[in-house]
Image (spheres, rainbow, N blue to C red):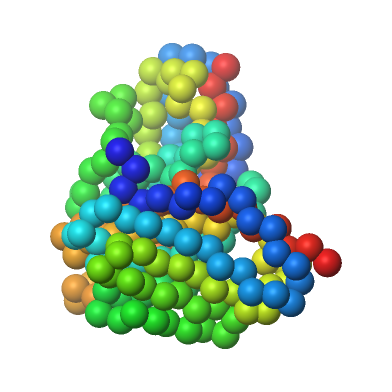
Amino acid sequence: DQQVKQNSPSLSVQEGRISILNCDYTNSMFDYFLWYKKYPAEGPTFLISISSIKDKNEDGRFTVFLNKSAKHLSLHIVPSQPGDSAVYFCAASAATASKLTFGTGTRLQVTL
Amino acid sequence: AAGVIQSPRHLIKEKRETATLKCYPIPRHDTVYWYQQGPGQDPQFLISFYEKMQSDKGSIPDRFSAQQFSDYHSELNMSSLELGDSALYFCASSLEGGGLRYEQFFGPGTRLTVL
């Protein structure tokens, strides 16, 4: 069963606008969440993470929001740039095990 | 900055053959993870090692085995290969000591094709 879900397989955003990628999880043991960006034929590249003790973490153009009660997190990219076009994976881990459980990914296309 | 190194980048094998994938973690990282990503799927955790000891095991077939060596590099050994083993295999490393949580950094992957 898919414990981490990204319900939007794809998203198209204009350059300069905000991109919002969403992720839902079902396992209440997850307490650490990460976003990775992936280009074809490359490994996932770490973007940003958030611990369950926080509800927001910001790094440059990237902000991750966590709503624990809703078991939902989102990644905001502002402003979006053409180089942001890639597949974005949400991932989660639990304190009892460091392995990552990935979502199914969202393909972001930033258009000119 | 040094990244995770995986070799080979591409590997083509016949059914029932064996394959060995290698991973060299980022210097000073003490934990290595292996993930398998099938076509159109998300990466699935296989196995991990912390300080050369197996720390966790996921959906890894009995035909696969892995180990971490004294220099912290890791090898994933796959025997009796099946067509369904064709996938991207990623290695990731992180620094886990002290009970803190750190992000995993991924290598470029090895694309295994079984014919």
Furthest toward the front, the residue is A70
Picture layout, residue B72 above or below residue B2? above
What count of labels does the image hold?
Answer: 0
Quadrant position of the C terminus of chain A in the picture: bottom right
Image position, residue A5 (x, y; %):
40, 50
Q: Residue at x 63, y 79 (%)?
A: A78
Asked if residue B106 can be seen in this view, the reply is: no
Picture layout, residue B12 above or below residue A9? above
**Quarter of the view holding residue B80:** top left
Picture layout, residue B11 above or below residue B34? above
Foreground pick, B43 / B70: B43
Q: Residue at x 54, y 22 (%)?
A: B114
Q: Residue at x 76, y 71 (%)?
A: A15
Left or right placement of residue B8 versus residue B56 in this view: right
Q: Residue at x 53, y 63 (%)?
A: A21
Left or right placement of residue A44 versus residue A4 in this view: right
Image position, residue A103 (x, y; %):
42, 51
Left or right placement of residue B44 versus residue A11 in this view: left
Asked if residue A93 can be seen in this view, the reply is: yes
Image position, residue B98 (x, y; %):
19, 76
Left or right placement of residue B62 versus residue B15 in this view: left
Image position, residue A54 (x, y; %):
30, 81
Foreground pick, B14 / A107: A107
